[in-house]
Image (tube, rainbow, N blue to C red):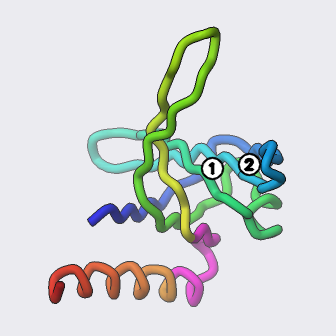
Amino acid sequence: MNLVVLTGALSSPPRVHTLPSGDTVANLEVTTRDPTGAQTVPVAVHRPAKAVAALTAGAEVVVVGSVHRRFFTAGGSTQSRTEVRADRVVSAGARRAVATVLDRAADRLAETRRG
């Protein structure tokens, strides 16, 4: 199962841009902390809600999604980037929304165990 749950702070404001297809993507950098230190994780949010685009640096968030590796051409060569593709991004302070996204993630895990 490819399931990611991150809790951390935004290192910078979301960078929102429009793809040639017309879809909108918000790129986030979420810094997580644990006893071993801090890690910054790139997160892509396709068709972000206005609330995601309005987040500011330092905002505490909970992200639920999956790991993806995308390939692109830069400088004449093919390169890749591993990132989390978010299904949901919610403010960590929104307790009810956090509980809902975590419950849904737990349900997905339970489904695979029954599988």
Q: Check if residue 53 falls in the magenta segment.
A: no
Cβ atoms under marks 2 and 1 closer than 8 Å: yes
Please name whichever residue, 86 or 36, is drawn nearer the observer in this view of the structure.
Answer: 86
Q: Position of residue 17 (x, y in %)?
A: 81, 45
The residue beneath circle 2 is 14
Please name whichever residue, 91 or 85, is drawn nearer the observer in this view of the structure.
Answer: 85
Q: Position of residue 95 (x, y in %)?
A: 56, 84
Q: In the displayed structure, does residue 55 sit left or right of residue 100?
A: right
Quadrant containing the C terminus in the rendered view: bottom left
Q: Position of residue 98 (x, y in %)?
A: 53, 80
Q: Amino acid under label 1?
A: Leu
Q: Check if residue 97 falls in the magenta segment.
A: yes
Q: Position of residue 12 (x, y in %)?
A: 70, 42
Q: Amino acid under label 2?
A: Pro
The magenta region covers 88-98
The residue beneath circle 1 is 10
The crowd level at tag 1 (other Cα within 10 Å; few <14, some 14-19, many 20+) is many
For image coordinates 82% across by 47% down, the residue present is 18
